[in-house]
Amino acid sequence: MHFEVFAIGTAFLFGLAVRQVGLPPLVGFLAAGFFINIIGPRFGLPAETGPILEYIANLGVLMLLFTIGLKLKLRQIAEPQVIGGALIHFGVSIVLFTPIIRLLFTSDWMSALLVGIALGFSSTVLSAKILEAKRELGTFHGRTAIGILIVQDIIALVVLAIFAGKLPGPWALLIFATPLLRPVLFKLLDLAGHDEVLLLTGMMLSLVIGGVGFEIIGLKGEIGALVMGLLLSSHPRAGELSNSLWALKEVFLIGFFLSIGMSGLPDWNSIGFALVLGVLLPLKGVLFFFILLAFKLRARTSFVTALSLTAYSEFGLIVAAGIPAAQDYLVPLAIAVSVSFLIAAPLNRFAHPIFERYEKQLQRFELSTRHPDEQPTDLGDANVLVFGMGRTGTAAYKALVQRGRRPIGLDADVYKVEAHTKAGRNVIFADAEDSNFWNSVDLTGISAAVLAMDDLEAKLIAARRLRGGGFSGTIVSHALHANHVEQITEAGADQTYLTMQEAGQSLAIHAIESTHFEKA
């Protein structure tokens, strides 16, 4: 237990430190893992992860995949750029990495091939964590990235089955019967209420039925957790269930990033291996970028999707651990994965500004055709923009309609746009962080803009681009935290309101208006 206490304390200090310089806390957790690995033995502590920390890390991964499933739609996995992008990238990666590994690190072609296969995968946990932190899981590029990662995870299971001889037994065919569970799962969620029972319901579905249940029938628990989330993704309370698990999942994932940094004590050969792969890491991103362009995606979508997939995968470690011929490379691969995380996390933090800086150069590679992620140029007769059509944006849209305005809603989640359109609302697909949208959209006739997105960076970009494009109308925004108000106002908003504070004031006004107080 002393080890786990020391690990948590170290993670806190490193996470707090990197946050002060604008980096994601997970970079600090990885660095904490390296630190513990180096100094742990001096204090009589093991350099490896303890059983409690390993267990917590596994729980965090299962819960993350479950919450990803809650936000997905099965049909998005079947899209051409998802299946085609994953398969082509995997094949080309093997062709590129295998000879390099053979030339520099081994004389055995089979070992080189297995390492090349491990390097062909991208990190599901890192990508999902970054996209979730930026609130981009529902965007076009976020869904594309997650879809590709799911296909890669399926490929990893096939690779394990072929090279490790771990073919699933006949019970694994029960996975095709999981849709029959949907009515039962829906009923459980209906009965769970809104308190701690809802939290326990999410834990049971992700960890027990998904995790342990799928391992019993011979499949990976990670796939089980994802499938459970997918089965519930169309339930009206899927978002509430995901939010109830958020804090617990975040705590457990600290264990995962610590364990990656503490995967093993490296020697000079391992360090050299990791450094070479760190230099080769951009190949993954460049390859994804051009493959997605070939599937007619725009340069921006291709770039931010590729960047989110530019990290070596923890699934590669699972593959290496499960195949005897590749086990000698387990520690070098673990160091390489850690190095790729340290490179990828800060880059993804600044993905949108990086694209804006090199936009003209990157757009030269776009195909001259109709793109599935095309942005609108004509807003029709609308006179008010509502960015972000979640609960807050939808409420603002309805209030504007009731007051005789002509609002148009904009959201980067294509499925959310589809749902609003079916409900009769004027909502279109558009991403406020996309410079192409701002360069082409016609704001003539727009008198006001409401920034209802949750992501701070998206609100800042939207306010700046509106003012930078000469928009002189009113910009009103909501804020989740008090320290965000000043930033949004400085970016160009006329008025910024704290969401919870406004909700409280609104309740008080309703109470006064509906109550006949006696005069004193």
Image (cartoon, rainbow, N blue to C red):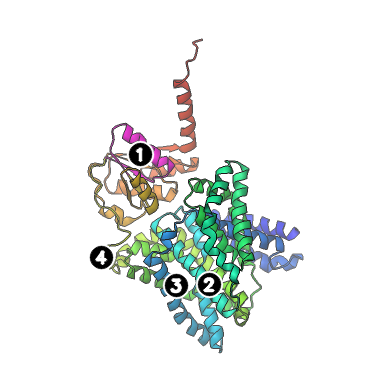
Type of amino acid under label 3: Lys
Say which label, 3 or 1, has the lower sequence index: 3
Instruction: List the residue tagged with mark 2.
Output: 156
Identified by mark 2, the residue type is Ala
Residue occupied by mark 4: 369
Gap between marks 1 and 4, in whole Å? 33 Å
| Quarter of the picture holding the N terminus | bottom right
* Residue 461 placement (x, y as % from top left): 37, 50
Q: Secondary structure at mark 2?
A: helix
Question: Which is nearer the N-term, disc 4 or disc 3?
Answer: 3
Label 4 or label 3, whichever lies nearer to me, is: 4
- Give SS at disc 1: helix
What SS does tag 4 mark? loop
Residue 378 seen in the figure: yes
Q: Which residue is pictured at 28% across the width and 32% down the height?
A: 404
Residue 512 in magenta stretch: no
Quadrant hosting residue 141 = bottom left
| N-term-proximal mark, 4 vs 2 | 2
Q: Position of residue 488 (x, y in %)?
A: 41, 44
Q: Which residues are magenta?
A: 383-408
| Between discs 1 and 4, the one toward the N terminus | 4
Q: Which residue is mark 3?
A: 284
Q: Of marks 1 and 2, which one's residue comes earlier in the chain? A: 2
